[in-house]
Amino acid sequence: MKINILTIFPEMFSGVFSNSILGRAVQNGLLEITCTDIRPFSQSKHKNTDDYPFGGGAGMVMMAQPILDAMAAVSASMPGARRIYLGPRGKRLSTSLARSLSRESGLILLCGHYEGVDQRALDLCVDEEISIGDYILTGGEIAAMVLTDCVSRFIPGVLGSEDSPEEESFSDGLLEYPQYTRPRVIRDLSVPEVLLSGDHAKIKAWRRAESLRATARFRPDLLEKAQLSDRDRAVLKEMVSCSSES
């Protein structure tokens, strides 16, 4: 998959995309990530990309012209790519959205900065706006990193195991079950016996129950939208009953 990030701070991305899983995916040709500097596309004398907003107000606004020209140049080399602006009013990034985006031929991510982007740039060259959460960042660069990381996990081969992204938190609407590794006992705390039993059916049932338990404890709001089986509901009911008795 090809991902091109339009930004005025391309130097922010080098460390993130050259290490760990993303770095290996790039080296193996599974991902092609490019950062395009918007500044050289500015037609102003000093190559500035921002100006004062019409109507007054605090801060500066990113100008439409450099963005439009940068987007046109990148889009010409990535026909069919989905053009996304990382902004607070966009659709919330989720597992299902990331999975859908991973099927696109390419992504062009526009990073806003300052007090925002001239609306005309968004109207003319953006297909979709996406938000990574209800909080304020200094710019869209970190949001672009988050989206790239999230989407890349659904690209075949990136994680090394086809099952990995489907077993993690939020993949089925629930939080992930607890994980353990060696040693078997540390500071008098032992790995649950069921994980040492070799009984895959029991292990699967335990993990599902613990996933439900973690979700009920830390993110009960997720249970309202999760697809639960009759068995899941019975397990949750039993947990509530045990909690009230204790």
Image (spheres, helix red, strand yellow):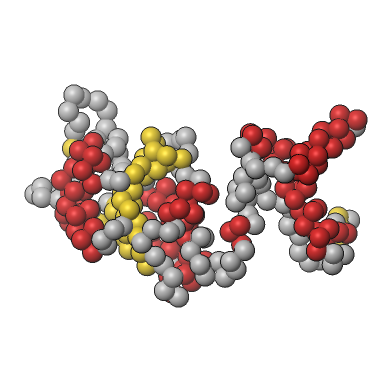
Image quadrant containing the C terminus: top right
Most extreme residue toward the front is 230
Q: Please count the marks in the image.
A: 0
The x and y percentages for residue 133 are: 47, 39
**Residue at 31% over, 57% down:** 81
**Residue at 44% over, 70% down:** 30
- Near-viewer residue (144 or 240): 240
**Residue at 43% over, 63% down:** 17
Image quadrant containing the N terminus: bottom left
- Near-viewer residue (47 or 78): 78
Does the rendering let one see residue 233?
Answer: yes
For residue 166, side relative to residue 198 (left or right): left
For residue 203, side relative to residue 222 (left or right): right
Q: Judge whether 246 appears above or below 13 on screen.
A: above
**Residue at 51% over, 45% down:** 94
Q: Judge whether 234 appears above or below 32 on screen.
A: above
- Name the image quarter holding residue 118: top left
- Name the image quarter holding residue 129: top left
The x and y percentages for residue 119 are: 23, 36
Does the rendering let one see residue 47?
Answer: no
Q: Judge whether 33 appears above or below 100 on screen.
A: below
- Near-viewer residue (115 or 206): 206
For residue 232, side relative to residue 66 (left or right): right
The x and y percentages for residue 171 are: 60, 51
The x and y percentages for residue 150 are: 49, 54
- Name the image quarter holding residue 33: bottom left
